[in-house]
Amino acid sequence: MTSSLLGIIPAAGSGVRARPYSYEMHKGLFAIDGQSNISRLITIMRDDFGIEDIVIVLGYMGDSIRQEFGDGSEYGVRIDYIENQHLDKGWAWSVLLAKPYLAGRHACVMLSDEFYLETNHADFAKCPYQEHTAMVAVQRVDDPEQIRRNFSVESEGDRVIRLVENPVHIPNDILGMANFIVAPEVLKALENAYDSGRGSIEFVNFIDELIRDGHSVSLFELSGQYINLNDVASLEAANDLAIRARLHNDNGD
């Protein structure tokens, strides 16, 4: 399967909350049952979305990521790299830096520190994303703290009406994940926002601004396991899940 989507993996952050592990290694490269999380994202983009072109946005310990993945040929994709030298501008800046590679395509954005296991991303890829300004992956959860650490999603059916990053009030059980499919107009709008003098823009908040401006944003409910790799405990939990899943599959259970 091939796709007209461009893959974008923002990986510029310093991983402060994953210390001491992240002192010597980018957290996107930590082995999760023998495979780094960035490697897992590349595989999802390639196998589930049919993506051939991926841009990885680098910052902290970027050279180690370049050395690990090279030009992407070992993964059957083409990888380009961009340096983000302005982390103070928010991770929306990392997404915008990939704009020269977009060439009129929609983009699939997946943060380097979000772990997915046995998900239905292949179904996400089949959604009519061309009909929307953006689509966002969500999951229903029992623990409101998960939502508080990520972002909340309010919707009417599949139509998203509000996104709130790190919400104080939790409106429902819908967890928002930093996995988006966005139209080229999103990056153009981001460019205009930064050009207007805005210093820092958080991507989730910006998508919410587009919703309030009348843009169509839809959700896709993702199945499977998900962990935001934001501290040492979450890295260990992801490793445990991946090992258990492999042993389950090896035993044919």
Image: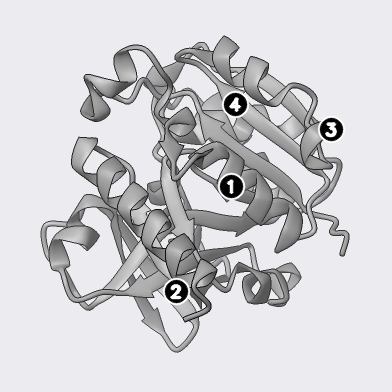
Residue at the spot of label 2:
160
Q: Earlier in the sequence, mark 4 or mark 2?
A: 4
Q: Earlier in the sequence, mark 3 or mark 2?
A: 3
* Mark nearer the viewer, 4 or 3: 3
- Amino acid tagged 2: Val
Q: Which residue is mark 1?
A: 41
Residue type, mark 4 in image: Val
Residue 169 picture location, percent across and down: 12, 64
Residues under numbered marks 3 and 1 in contact, where contact means CB atoms less than 8 Å apart = no
Q: Measure how far apart labels 3 and 2 are at the Cα level.
A: 37 Å
Dot 1 amino acid type: Leu
Which x, y percent locates residue 14? 36, 20
Q: Which mark is residue 120?
A: none
Distance (Cα) linking label 3 and label 1:
15 Å
Q: How far is disc 2 from disc 1 in space, using C-alphas?
A: 25 Å
Task: Give neighbour class at mark 4: few <14, some 14-19, many 20+ (Cα, 10 Å).
Answer: many
Category of crowding for the residue at label 3, using alpha-carbon neighbours closer than 10 angstroms: few (below 14), some (14–19), many (at least 20): few
Q: Nearer the viewer, mark 4 or mark 2?
A: 4
Q: Are marks 1 and 4 in contact (CB under 8 Å)?
A: no
Q: Which residue is mark 3?
A: 73
Quick check: marks 2 and 1 in contact, CB under 8 Å?
Answer: no
Residue 199 visible in this rendered orientation of the protein: no
* Residue lying at 55% horizontally and 38% vertically, measured from the top left: 38
Where disc 1 sits, the SS reads helix
| Residue bearing the label numbered 4 | 57
Q: Quadrant of residue 66?
A: top right
- Front one among 128 and 77: 77
Looking at the image, tell me whether mark 4 or mark 3 is earlier in sequence order: 4
- Residue 61, relative to residue 213: is it above or below? above
Report the front residue among 104 and 236. Answer: 236
